[in-house]
Image (cartoon, rainbow, N blue to C red):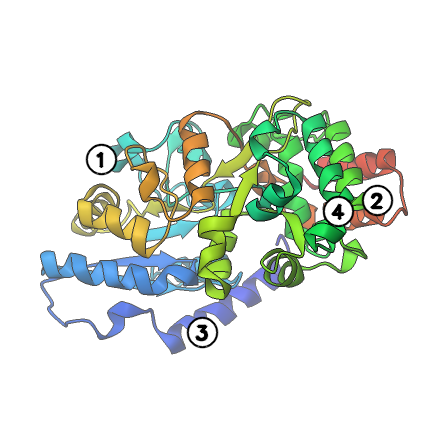
Amino acid sequence: MKKTIKLSLALLSTAAVLAACGGGSGDNAGSDSEAVVVEFFSQKPEITTQLEALAASYTEQNPDVRINITTVGSGEGSAALQAKFSSGDEPALMMLGGLPEVERYSDTLLDVTELELSDTVIEGMLEGGTIEGVPLGVPMNIEGFGWMYNKEIFEQAGVNPDDIQSYDDFVTAVETLDSQKEELGIDAVFAFSGAENYIANQFSANFTSPEYNNSILESYSATELNWEYGDQMQKYTDLFNQYNVQPILTIDYSRSVEELFINDAVAMVHQGNWIVPTLNGIDPEFAANKMGILPVFGENDTTGKIIAGAPWYIGINKNLDEAVVEEAKAFLDWMYTSEEGQTAVLEEFEFVPAQEGYDVEAISDPVSQQIYQALLDGETGAMTHKQYPDGWFQQVLFPEYQKYLNGDISWDEFETNTSNRFAEMR
């Protein structure tokens, strides 16, 4: 990411694509020259249709405003956004992937305390968009992850998830499930995705979050990773590796979630509520009736937490015409505070909202409801895995973790190797 030549080529390529393909829903919108046009740059293709529908509804109610949606995803969004700025085609609203991107555009972004919706954001959730004490983005939604489990398998095995109040309780549950594999008809207790780098990355947050005091800002500014809670991570790793579908290094997302978990072949996977749409596409009843989430005891054997936070922040470009800035603020406030907008957030986008005041029961599925309630209750860890040095989890954490899973290095070697490279790459 720091190689100027490669980045420049990527920007030129992306600029050409944008010029050739155009922006999105607004390209064929009305040509009223009096309308204020608000360009919204999105990096999440999964919600393009919903965003366009919401924008159209807003324009119906505000005929002098057009909201144009441009979507570039699949890992190309960051480069595409830079290309738009380089070409002078700056959007008014932009979806940003956490503090690194927020800092990149900090001279452009508006202080979002001016927004009505900022007063409703769950405590601590503005932190992920804050630079030098100024909140420059509002959280788009909330995601959370932990051990997703199959309620029916647990019930058949006589394991009550409410009784899992410590790491030792978790071990007992795992051993109980394993002892009944044949009766339960499962291949193994776990289907941890040892072939996916982002799964190792997310899993690590259970143990780095407490090291950084469950703070996004502290983890973003950290120059060292000392694995203060590495012993807990090793215990979990050894446990699931012993009771996992093997070879563990061949288990990818598709096999873990779309083959094994949803077909009742394993009891648990380490995943987040973002798998709900995938599950719904295969079996609409699974997430609604069969899936639960267990926390990870990352800090000690008795303090269990779900890692949760905002994967995306929405910022407003303060450097555009005043009329555009004001309409961008108005649309964002309407999206998250009006009855129509809140209904869309819950029912059309199927988001876990980052704002207080929502009816927990109205959230789309039980796991997402639990994540939302845990956030409200202050019982979650921080998404520290999104704040690691650029490229560290892909180039260092994942390959070293795979080596440990495969028995090629000791845990001390894993900690030393990853810690040293963390400091170097920061």
The residue lying at 44 percent from left, 43 percent from top is 366
Q: Is residue 62 visible?
A: no
**Residue under circle 1?**
116
The residue lying at 15 percent from left, 71 percent from top is 30
- Sequence-first disc among 4 and 2: 4
**Residue under circle 3?**
17
**Residue under circle 4?**
396
Q: Amino acid at mark 3?
A: Val
Position of the C terminus by quadrant: top right
**Where's residue 17, x and y in %?**
44, 74
Which one is in front in this view, the residue at disc 2 or the one at disc 1? 2
**Where's residue 394, x and y in %?**
69, 51
**Residue under circle 2?**
404
**Where's residue 78, x and y in %?**
49, 56
- Sequence-first disc among 3 and 2: 3
- Sequence-first disc among 1 and 3: 3
Distance (Cα) linking label 4 and label 2:
12 Å
Q: Amino acid at mark 1?
A: Glu
Whether the residues at callouts 4 and 1 have beta carbons within 8 Å, the answer is no
Disc 1, SS: loop
Which one is in front in this view, the residue at disc 3 or the one at disc 2? 2
